[in-house]
Image (cartoon, rainbow, N blue to C red):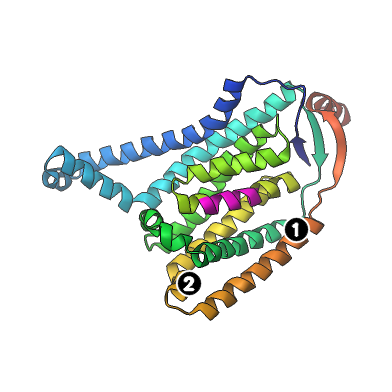
Amino acid sequence: MIRWAGRQERLEIPFLQRVWGLVYPWLVYEGVSVLVTFAFAFYKTMTDPSFVATAGSVTDHSLRLSEEVYAYYLPLSVVICLITIPLLLLFISLDRKREQREEFTEELWERPAPWGFALCFFCGVSACVVLNHVLMYSGLYSLLQEQYDDTAQILFQGNLILEIISVGILTPVTEELIFRGLVYRRLRWSADALPAILFSSFVFAVFHGNLLQGIYSFVIGVLLAFVYERTHSLLAPVFVHVGANLVSVVLTEVEGLQSMYLQGNESAFLLMTGGMMLLFVIAFYLFYARIRPARMEENVSAGALDQEQEEQYGT
């Protein structure tokens, strides 16, 4: 069973408190990133005499530290995610307790079937390929490539296992906890689905820091929030996001789409992305038509529901 607290007309949250609730999960992630990076730089400085000796001036030392951080970005990002994920889960748990304390009107839904999550995964895989195709074919990729290249060099360093663990799995889980599990869910406390989807997707796009990734992230963010709204399960957008990131890792390592496009093999490029577009349409249609979790009970306050369960099970 899944509890889902939708829009509450009677709920009044002060504006600054509402803004803070949307911002601080992101700040927690950034804070953990800074602390882990600082700890790594301090460790490197204290334990590597040759590093200190060859650094020279303060400026040279800072540049060397930056290079070391970039070189170890993937293992550092794994550590950052492993520290951040439990904190985000704690915040989500506190949100659920707040919903119970405030007696938000809730709806009970059955969890989607396992094959529904497989559809979500294929939606993510195909959406990633299609969006990259559109960005390349429209000329936006060539126009904004310089902004993205620095990020790509950091994310895709040739260690496939670390890329899969960090970029393909842990980063999507972390981002879904932040932007769907906290930001979107909190927006739904006081807003309808459409504005909550659009605003959370905009914040998700800004988070990625450059225009090319921002355009991609906004569109994917709309899909992720829609999937969350449709299924009422945070696992669903996680599967979409993991699918999109994993195929991005694989295609980057084998230089799939980019090499076909840049080498002028346009027919193969269009054939592959056209097939992926068809896969997305089919997967999304099946998802939309079939994934309708059965509503079990409506307009039940969390407090009343807990009392009913206590009476039923004697707990």
- In this rendering, the answer to whether 141 lies above or below 91 is below
Q: Could you say which is closer to the camera, residue 297 or residue 50? A: 297
Residue 181 magenta: no
Label at residue 18: none
Label at residue 287: 1
Type of amino acid under label 1: Phe
Q: CA distance from mark 2 to mark 1?
A: 27 Å
Q: Residue at x 47, y 54 (%)?
A: 212
Q: Residue at x 48, y 52 (%)?
A: 213
Q: Residue at x 54, y 66 (%)?
A: 133
Query: Residue 268 placed where, x, y %?
Result: 54, 79
Q: Could you say which is closer to the camera, residue 254 or residue 207? A: 207
State the predominant SS element of the stretch in magenta.
Answer: helix
Q: Residue at x 40, y 52 (%)?
A: 74
Instruction: Examine the rendering and report whether any part of residue 170 can be seen.
Output: no
Query: Residue 253 placed where, x, y %?
Result: 43, 67
Query: Residue 17 placed where, x, y %?
Result: 59, 22
Which image quarter: residue 90? top right
Residue stretch rendered in magenta on the structure: 215-224
Do tag 2 and tag 1 residues touch (Cβ < 8 Å)? no
The residue that mark 2 highlights is 256
Secondary-structure class at tag 2: helix
The answer to whether 168 appears left or right of 43 in the picture is right
Q: Quadrant of the C terminus?
A: top right
Q: Could you say which is closer to the camera, residue 99 or residue 224? A: 224
Secondary-structure class at tag 1: helix
Q: Quadrant of the N terminus?
A: top right
Earlier sequence position, callout 2 versus callout 1: 2
The answer to whether 122 appears left or right of 76 in the picture is right
Q: Residues within 10 Å of mark 1 (few under 14, many from 20)?
A: many
Which image quarter: residue 307? top right
Type of amino acid under label 2: Gly
